[in-house]
């Protein structure tokens, strides 16, 4: 018999929601003015600074208007800056500010703490297998 509480989708949703809440809580309690959504964009920019909003939307599997709003808020808060593309003036590139670059290690430590909270008591090999399984599920559904 099907039980919602035992379904994969429900367990993934609940786990994601709890991790998101915990990450936001850690950022707030440490006095950092960012959210999990902003952290995702910052992470992509830490990997490769100077990306288009479109590439950030694709990498984070979000629609462009929501990424545009996020970037606008982040720009107002001094986390990123938009600059015109050197060859296509219709496109803006998003860059980290010096402040964001300076905060990278602090933000990353908070993200790692959240992962440690979530994986407490789980054997590292089991956790790695879980990540591989989730990657496979994503590929199956893409």
Image (cartoon, rainbow, N blue to C red):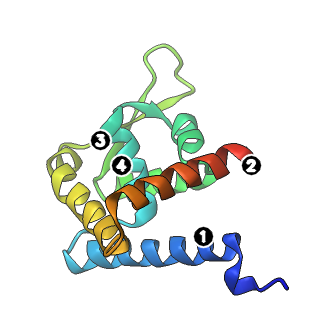
Residue 137 percent across, percent down from the top left: 66, 52
**Disc 1 crowd, CA 10 A, few/some/many (<14, 14-19, 20+):** few
Q: Nearer the viewer, mark 4 or mark 2?
A: 2
Q: Which of 3/90 is in front?
A: 3
- Circle 2: is it few (<14), some (14-19), or many (20+) Cα within 10 Å? few
Residue at the location (67% across, 43% down)?
139
Q: CA distance from mark 2 to mark 1?
A: 14 Å
Q: Which residue is mark 2?
A: 141
State how far apart marks 4 and 1 are (Cα): 24 Å
Tell me if I can see residue 33 in this picture: no
Lateral position of residue 92 relative to residue 74, left or right? right
Q: Are marks 4 and 3 in contact (CB under 8 Å)?
A: yes
Q: Cβ–Cβ below 8 Å for labels 2 and 3? A: no
Q: Position of residue 52 (x, y in %)?
A: 50, 33
Which residue was labeled with disc 1? 12
* Label 4 Cα crowd, 10 Å radius (few <14 / some 14-19 / many 20+): many
Q: Which mark is residue 96?
A: 3
Residue shown at 43%/78% (left/top)?
Answer: 21
Q: Mark 2 or mark 1: which comes first in sequence?
A: 1
Report which residue position mark 4 lands on. Answer: 42
* Element on which disc 3 rests: strand
């Amino acid at each position: 018999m099907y039980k919602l509480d035992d379904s994969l989708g429900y367990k993934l949703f609940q786990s994601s929601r709890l991790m998101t809440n915990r990450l936001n809580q850690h950022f707030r309690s440490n006095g950092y003015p960012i959210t999990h959504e902003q952290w995702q964009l910052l992470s992509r920019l830490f990997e490769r600074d100077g990306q288009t909003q479109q590439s950030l939307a694709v990498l984070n599997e979000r629609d462009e208007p929501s990424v545009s709003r996020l970037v606008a808020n982040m720009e107002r808060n001094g986390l990123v800056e938009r600059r015109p593309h050197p060859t296509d003036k219709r496109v803006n590139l998003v860059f980290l500010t010096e402040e964001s670059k300076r905060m990278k290690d602090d933000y990353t430590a908070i993200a790692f703490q959240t992962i440690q909270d979530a994986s407490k008591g789980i054997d590292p090999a089991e956790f790695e297998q879980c990540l591989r399984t989730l990657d496979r599920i994503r590929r199956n559904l893409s």
